[in-house]
Image (cartoon, rainbow, N blue to C red):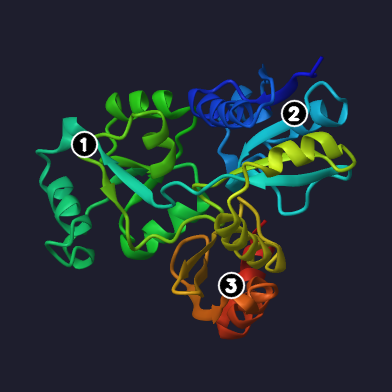
């Protein structure tokens, strides 16, 4: 009798959506599978800003422990939440085809008549230059230090407010607040069919490394489950997210560092953009380059060193000193 593959997942609506895709994919390949729900530390503490929680692994640690204890066979993670160095005994087994990697601004409908809010929306949609037109302190919600830094770089008069919780909780908090809007990952809202019609894609905001991708991990010597998971792997997404995560690891960054990266495959080339901001958004270093897919292996590391030479080292040192 075929054994059932136990898929570990957080119990949020988004995490369950991701895990159900994995379950369906395994079943389509002839494997029996079931979901095992596990609470993460990041789901339990919904008040402390992520960057104050020593956030690397905060959403993955409980699942990794369950995996090592053989309570589950495969763990499903939002890839951007996974530390670049996996726990001993755990390996990446697959990366699903990437979804929307962009960030979204969701405006607060109750404040749309506010003059400054209208100026902001016009700026975000490109109808006005925006930056010089917004002098008052608009309150924008985000728990991401990366989004905060990029937003303040563009809109320095804004006040960034912390917001935590799952997608539904954050949307409700926004509705009940006096914030002008909040920033969300597009993939998260779209996967649970909660993207508001008025949401605006922030095309100027570079995403977190591996944003929009889903990673599967398994025990390193578990050949059976590693082979099963590998059937769901998307090679292009695996290549691009590896470059982004190599870039992040080489810069010694995590979720508490405003580092962004995006690699895309176009016409047999890897197109890469990466940046780092100071915590207050006033300083920025960036790199942009392309390479043939055949040269992708060390591309992330090379881009990280180029960024450090282009002003990134000074910014990274200041961030380190501020912690």
Residue 310 seen anywhere in this rendered image of the structure: yes
- Indicate whether 316 appears above or below 183: below
Badge 3 crowding class, 10 Å Cα cut-off, few under 14, some 14 to 19, many 20 or more, is some
Give the quarter of the figure containing the C terminus: bottom right
Nearest the viewer among 129 and 96 is 96
How far is disc 1 from disc 3 in space, using C-alphas? 37 Å
Q: Please report the residue visible at 32 percent of the width from the left and 30 percent of the height from the top.
A: 174
Give residue 253's position: percent from left, percent from top. 66, 60
How far is disc 2 from disc 1 in space, using C-alphas? 35 Å
Q: Which residue is mark 3?
A: 315
- Residue 62 — which label? 2
Question: Which circle's residue, 1 or 3, is located before the other in the chain?
Answer: 1
Give residue 54's position: percent from left, percent from top. 69, 43
- Indicate whether 85 appears above or below 64: below
Count the numbered circles shown: 3
Q: Which residue is mark 1?
A: 197
Residue 302 relative to residue 48: left or right:
right
Q: Please report the residue visible at 54 percent of the width from the left and 47 percent of the height from the top.
A: 213
Badge 2 crowding class, 10 Å Cα cut-off, few under 14, some 14 to 19, many 20 or more, is some
């Amino acid at each position: 009798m075929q054994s059932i593959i136990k898929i570990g997942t957080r119990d949020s609506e988004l995490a369950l959506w991701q895990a159900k895709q994995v379950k369906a994919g395994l079943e389509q390949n002839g494997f029996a599978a079931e979901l095992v729900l596990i609470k993460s530390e990041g789901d339990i503490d919904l008040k402390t800003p992520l960057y104050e929680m020593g956030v690397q692994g905060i959403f993955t640690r409980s699942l990794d422990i369950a995996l090592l204890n053989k309570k589950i066979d495969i763990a499903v993670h939002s890839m951007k939440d996974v530390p670049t160095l996996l726990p001993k005994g755990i390996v990446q087994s697959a990366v699903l085809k990437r979804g929307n990697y962009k960030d979204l601004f969701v405006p607060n409908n109750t404040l749309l008549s506010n003059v400054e809010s209208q100026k902001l929306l016009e700026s975000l949609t490109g109808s006005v230059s925006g930056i010089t037109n917004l002098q008052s302190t608009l309150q924008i919600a985000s728990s991401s230090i990366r989004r905060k830094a990029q937003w303040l770089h563009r809109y320095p008069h804004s006040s960034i407010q912390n917001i935590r919780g799952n997608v539904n909780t954050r949307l409700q908090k926004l509705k009940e607040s006096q914030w002008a809007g909040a920033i969300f990952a597009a993939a998260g809202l779209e996967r649970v069919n909660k993207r508001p019609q008025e949401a605006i894609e922030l095309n100027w905001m570079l995403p977190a490394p591996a944003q929009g991708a889903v990673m599967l991990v398994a025990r390193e010597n578990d050949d059976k489950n590693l082979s099963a998971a590998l059937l769901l792997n998307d090679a292009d997404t695996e290549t691009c997210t590896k470059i982004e995560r190599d870039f992040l690891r080489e810069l010694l960054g995590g979720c508490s560092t405003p580092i962004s990266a995006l690699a895309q495959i176009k016409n047999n080339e890897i197109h890469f953009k990466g940046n780092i901001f100071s915590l207050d958004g006033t300083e920025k270093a960036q790199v942009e380059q392309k390479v043939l897919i055949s040269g992708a292996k060390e591309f992330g590391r090379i881009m990280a060193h180029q960024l450090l030479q282009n002003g990134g080292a000074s910014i990274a040192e200041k961030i380190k000193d501020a912690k």
